[in-house]
Each structure stands twice: as C-alpha cells, then as structure tokens.
Image (cartoon, rainbow, N blue to C red):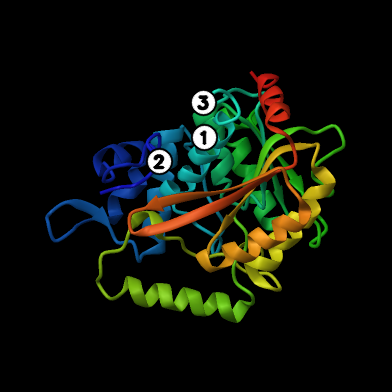
Amino acid sequence: MSKLHPRNPHQDRYNIDLLCQATPGLKPFVTKNPRGEDTIDFSNAKAVLALNKALLAHHYGVHHWSIPDGFLCPPIPGRADYIHYAADLLASDNNGKVPVGKKVRVLDVGTGANLVYPIIGSQTYGWQFTGSEINPESHRAAAANITQNPNLVSKIKLVEQTDASSVFKGVIQPNDRFSFTMCNPPFHKSAADAAAGSQRKNRNLNKGKAIQESTLNFGGQRSELWCEGGELAFIGNMIEQSKVFRNNVCWFTCLVSKQDHLSVVKRMLKKCKPTDVRIIDMAQGQKVSRFVAWTFLSQLQRSEWLQKSL
C-alpha cells in the first residue's frame, strides 16, 4: 500500500496506457509482470528515462524533457513528495492553507540537468523557482528543458554557481526573499563510494526481487552523487552559510538520506540557534526518507511573510 503524500498524484500503479498516450516512446519498453500487468524493466535505464518523460508529460504538461547520458534520472514519485511536504510546511505558518502562485519563491540548490523539483512545484502550485547549478553541462541541459516548454519559461530561472565552496552566496541576492530553499545533497564521500553504491543497486535490481518503483534512480555526475566529506559535510556547510541569509529565507530545507545522520545534523543546527527545527518524514513504499527544515524567523514573522505571498 502506497504511503506517498495524499496530494501526490503517483499514488497507485502507473497507468501504462495513459502514459504511452502521453509519450509513445514508452511503448517499446512495456512488458508484463508475473501477474500479467503492464510494467517496465526498472533495471533498464532507458526504460526508466522513457517512463520519466511520460510521467512529466502526463502529470505536469512537460512534453520536451531530456538529460545528457550518464546524468541523474530521478524517481518522480519520491521527488514529488518533497514538494508536497514542503507545501505543508508553508501551510503550517499560513493557517493550514498551502500558499500558491508566483509570489511564492523557491530556491532549488543544485537543481541538476533534470530540473525535476522546479517542474513539479511550478506546475502543481504555481510557485516561482530559481535553480542553482554548478555543473556547466547540467546548467545547459536544464536551460534547454525550460526553453522547450512554454509552461516553464516564466516559472523557472537558472543561476550558475561558480564557487564550489558556496551554497547560497552568489545565488541569493540582497533583496531576494525565498519562502523556502530545498536541496537533494550529494550523499557519497568519494567517487569510489558512489560506484560501490551503484554496484549494490544493480545487484539488487538483478536479483529479481520486488523493487519499489519510487526508490530508483540511474546515473549521476560527481556534483550529483558525491562531495568531499559526503552528505554531512555538505549539510554542515549549508547550515553554517544559512546564518548569513537568515532574513532572505523563510525556511531552509534539505534532504537527509541516512537516519543515522540526523543526530549530527541536529547538533550542527543547535549551534546556529534557529528559532525552529523540524524533521519531516516521508515514506514511499518500504523506503523512508526525510528532510530537515530550519528557520531563524519567529512564527509571527513567517506568517506575515507568507501573507505577503498571497
């Protein structure tokens, strides 16, 4: 039974017929599972890419989407959950109502070639996104995905991050006001660590065991998969730098891939003295993920901020 967010449109089994109508290129990859139901081979990267194209076309009106070979192909259902739970976070400061429309500005740190968070958030809630990206090829691919889809052109802008040591500097300008920032950080410590993780994933996929459709992704470049010190180093750097932009952002958020890392993240946050810290759990099938959220603003300041976004 799916445990995706109630507003997530990817609750049930994929309707392969509808997805093939949206993207005929998916048809060659359709097979039957042991129960005789239409599915695809989730160990086939090309099949997963075709599925993503169909999901983005059918659910979000994005009919021209591609990523370079070897780049991260994200699982759409799980990515959508982050957006919907972040919407609930904003609603908690807005009398339980999710703020919608272009006045709600969101920063996606390391948006990647796939641009998946801005696509889902802009088409679901009408939010205005800024995506930062340090990889030039990812930046070019993301820009192409925007320009080829008229419904994205006015909703998403890109900023090239040129300093690998900076998360927000060079991206957030003095007069910017973001309702929240989001990030799927690189979680491996090295290229070897990332390669080992990919090998484990491939072994699991090829054992013939049931794989949760929402947990899979393929490919990935260095900036997408690993950084010196891994996830904790990246998040620690983000937390430290967030202090400088405490008045530019209502909520800072970031995915934390490992449950074991939460205690360390909480200690790092405590040193920065935010006014509120929340851990938001998300469950997709058998997989549980979460993101951490912190703010330097009071409840009243946050409510007033969001009221200005309506």
Tell me which label, 2 or 3, sits earlier in the chain. 2
Which of these two is toward me, 74 or 48? 74
Location of residue 88 in the rendering, given as x and y in whole percent from the top left corner = 51, 34
Q: Is residue 20 above or below residue 265?
A: above
Give SS at disc 2.
Answer: loop
User: Which residue is labeled 2 in the image?
Assistant: 5
Amino acid, disc 3: Gly
Side of 203 where 134 appears, left or right:
right
Judged by depth in the image, the label closer to the viewer, 2 or 3, is: 3
Which residue is depicted at the point 64% across and 75% down?
189
Amino acid, disc 1: Asp
Q: How many neighbours does mark 1 have within 10 angstroms: few (below 14), some (14-19), or many (20 or more)?
A: some
Side of 130 where 37 appears, left or right:
left
Amino acid, disc 2: His
Give SS at disc 3.
Answer: loop
Which residue is depicted at the point 51% across and 54% down?
290
Q: Give the image quarter of residue 9.
A: top left
Tell me which label, 1 or 3, sits earlier in the chain. 1
How many angstroms separate mark 2 from mark 3 (CA)? 16 Å
Q: How many neighbours does mark 2 have within 10 angstroms: few (below 14), some (14-19), or many (20 or more)?
A: many
User: Which residue is labeled 1 in the image?
Assistant: 88
Location of residue 221 in the rendering, given as x and y in whole percent from the top left corner = 61, 66
User: Which residue is labeled 3 in the image?
Assistant: 96
Which residue is depicted at the point 26% across and 64% down?
210
Q: Is residue 122 above or below residue 73?
A: above
Give SS at disc 1.
Answer: helix
Q: Answer whether labels 1 and 2 touch (C-beta < 8 Å).
A: yes
Location of residue 114 in the rendering, given as x and y in whole percent from the top left corner = 56, 50
Tell me which label, 1 or 2, sits earlier in the chain. 2
Q: Is residue 194 above or below residue 62?
A: below
How many angstroms separate mark 1 from mark 2 (CA)? 10 Å
Which residue is depicted at the point 55% across and 23% down?
95
